[in-house]
Image: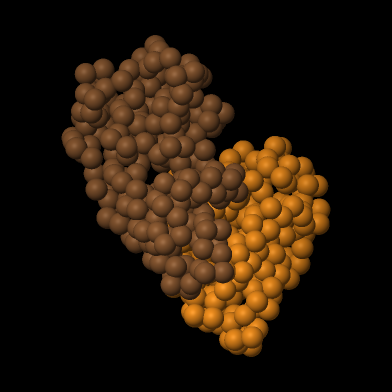
Chain colours: A brown, B orange
Amino acid sequence: MALKVIGFDADDTLWVNENYFREAEDAFCELLSDFLPKEEVMKILFDIEMKNLEIYGFGIKGFMLSMTETVVEIAGEKATHEMFAKVLSLGKEMLNKPVELLDEVENILNELKDRYRIILVTKGDLLDQQRKLEKSQLEKFFHHVEVMSNKHERDYQKLIKHLDVKPEEFLMIGNSLKSDILPVVKIGAKAIYVPYEITWQHEAVSKDEDHGVGYQQVESLSEVLNYL
Amino acid sequence: MALKVIGFDADDTLWVNENYFREAEDAFCELLSDFLPKEEVMKILFDIEMKNLEIYGFGIKGFMLSMTETVVEIAGEKATHEMFAKVLSLGKEMLNKPVELLDEVENILNELKDRYRIILVTKGDLLDQQRKLEKSQLEKFFHHVEVMSNKHERDYQKLIKHLDVKPEEFLMIGNSLKSDILPVVKIGAKAIYVPYEITWQHEAVSKDEDHGVGYQQVESLSEVLNYL
């Protein structure tokens, strides 16, 4: 069955993202360093993020709200208004970051755009993802942009139905085994895994979940051209 | 030209929304009542919301972050961690509200669903709107659900292109002149305005913008059936 549609993940596949979260987390831990060491602040923040994930979803605004909650939890009555102001400014700084494309992204999209329908498949805040796409100047390459609140099997099934293609005609390329690769393989579609230098803890998968079969893994995005 | 697609706005057209914001604002003003009277708190909060609208977009998470910023601004060093905790709990309560359908919504959608392609056209947080749609049990009526980060003319133009219909074949029904009616009329599509009992200040339009022409106005949603 010939491939018709290629879906690209955005964050950490086409452009830098996770690094900005790590920088913000470092500054956040510093803010609370009088109360707890970094590892403990990180653990509490992550637990609060996970607890809130169902109601906030992915993205920077939810991250800001979880940092706010972490200040309340850790600093308690010693929390100052400056701490909360700092959380807001860390988040706003993230929302205003320029978009830094990863190596070769434009060349690769340019190479593929006339041979396949290329779409962008990302999760997170709708507005934030649209803004990044605009800043990236990559919009012209994409036939369709799908911002999903999650990337589970049923979300990909809906997407494929909407695109009016069969699973075997769809290929997903991304840096998250959990979100871009395993659910896609499970519904019978194709996937190429391009690991990024850092992975958010939430996106990590265990050996039980990933048997390394059913998808290709490459070292860098430009290698995907060898398979297309 | 025969009508093919009907777009329904969601918040305050199909279900209650603005009332929950008003309740939260009342509680928020109460929280800061030792510092400033209600009208002044509301004015500062609104100004902060408007300043942040471009980066946060519409929705409850942005509202929570703007309330947080308002506490910092108004209470300053007298701000307590309880105030910030209260803002978080007010927002989470909103995110967990049940969906309360407006009168006759199910009957009306049921009446129209076989005669037109019915779609949901809403702005705000993707996850929150999806959750409300799920809770509403109205998903079965909609051919397509479009969550937009904004409802400007260009957004409706994109939507119509995506739906593959001509402007004259599209009708939008909603409670906001600014978001659901005027931009739709401007691109040559049809619109029916169903005012809701309360309107968010941001959605208000001046006499200069609205000449009352180019759309129908009805008293209640069930009256739209007279035109279809």
Percent x, y of residue B148: 50, 52
Front residue of B211 and A164? A164
Percent x, y of residue A54: 59, 44
* Residue B214 higher or lower than A48, as above or below: below
Front residue of B69 and B192? B69
Q: Residue at x 63, y 67 (%)?
A: B86
Q: Quadrant of residue B118?
A: top right
Tell me if B212 is positioned left or right of B196 in this view.
Answer: left
Q: Residue at x 57, y 73 (%)?
A: B80
Percent x, y of residue A227: 26, 17
Percent x, y of residue B143: 62, 38
Residue B162 visible to the viewer? no
Residue A188 visible to the viewer? yes
Tell me if B161 is positioned left or right of A133 in this view.
Answer: right
Q: Quadrant of residue A88?
A: bottom left
Which quarter of the rendering shows the C terminus of chain A?
top left
